[in-house]
Image (tube, grey):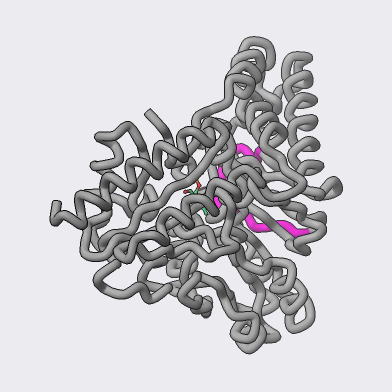
Amino acid sequence: MIYFDNSSTTQPDESVLESFMAANHKYYANPASLHVLGREAEALLDRSKEQMLKLVGNENGNVVLTAGGTEANNLAIFGLSEAYRARGNHIITTQIEHPSILQACRKLEDNRFEVDYLSVDEQGLISLDELEKTLRKDTILVSIMHVNNEIGTIQPIRQCAELIKKNSRAIFHSDCVQSYGKLPVNMESLQVDAITISAHKVNGLKNSGALLLKKGVTPQAINFGGGQENGLRSGTVSVPNAVAMAKAMRISSVQEERADYREWRNLLIEACRRYENIQVLSPEYGAPHILSIAFKSINGEVAVNYFQEHGIILSTSSACSSKNKNASHVIEAIGLENKFKNGVIRISFGNTNTKDQLDEFITVLKSFMDLIERGM
Ligand SMILES: Cc1ncc(COP(=O)(O)O)c(C=O)c1O
């Protein structure tokens, strides 16, 4: 099988699994324990966190380990809004965030916070003008994703940061779950105060993620118990998970965007443009690993099944929304024409893919389009 669904999740890398197993064998002690095994586990935990921070250019900052990107995003929204509430109650995000940001923001609206959801154009890009006009003196938190998981739009995070700093005292969080490992993610150059990363999107393990924070930026806790992670995330910390996540981040870290993915994506775009019945939804300069296309008057599921029968795995817009029969919030936000709305599929590359697999995809696409043109 050819796996082109890497934005949903990736296959764990062998070296990550080995690190995880080795740490489980030797460093199974509770890192909060005072005995020698506990202290050894704690030292390894600290080293893993230092590596994560270094990899995102945030050596002096902090990491809160979580059970994945969803929890880290929840901690960012609930925890940071509560921590900075004395400054105001206004929050800004976008219409196309992952549900772990959007649903958390909706919940905050029930709790006397005011949330503005920035609109996007047909390529999923926010407008810097709209951001500037929406910022207020009482804006306490802005959360804008780096790369959109459904169509791969890259938001101008650095420019957003400059506007935010100029016009408010807001904390700036960015969901970097889809950008890490494919684009450079450096908190210093992006000028962000907090980012979310999820290990399973970069050949790590599921249920393992982190909220990485600039020094001095501290959310309030959203879960309660033994006070681990400096009181920010109670629950016994899994040192093997931390080791495995640091390893996954290390092996996938990039200083420049993935040029191989960019090249494959360009080839795919070129192939898709040969067919009138296909619309390319992803922006030309979107993330190199995600390509979203839509078939006219054809159900995305039909296409996904056809490709599966021919040995290729991909998904309709995103794994979260693929079981939902309606168009996703992202597809609605970019204002896709009705006749394309049900025909969206997403191809996403990862470390296990090769150029030959891409050629195979293009061949299967051609046979699918021939079939469609002949009326199935
Ligand atoms: C942009 C984005 N943010 C957050 C998440 C949630 O991450 P996790 O699956 O680790 O909870 C995902 C997962 O699909 C994502 O694509």
Residue farthest top in this picture: 25
- Residue depicted at 65% across the width and 19% down the height: 19
What residue range appears in magenta? 217-228
Q: Position of residue 37 (x, y in %)?
A: 74, 14
Q: Position of residue 347 (x, y in %)?
A: 43, 48
In the rendered view, does 303 fall on the left or right side of 59? left
Q: Is residue 5 above or below residue 298?
A: above
Q: Position of residue 17 (x, y in %)?
A: 58, 20
Which of the pair 12/194 is nearer the observer? 12
Residue 294 colored in magenta in the image: no
- Screen quadrant of the N terminus: top left
Whether residue 251 is visible here, answered yes or no, is yes
- Residue depicted at 37% across the width and 65% down the height: 279
Q: Is residue 28 above or below residue 301?
A: above
Whether residue 79 is visible here, answered yes or no, is no
In the rendered view, does 80 fall on the left or right side of 329? right
Question: What is the chief secondary structure element of the magenta stretch?
Answer: loop
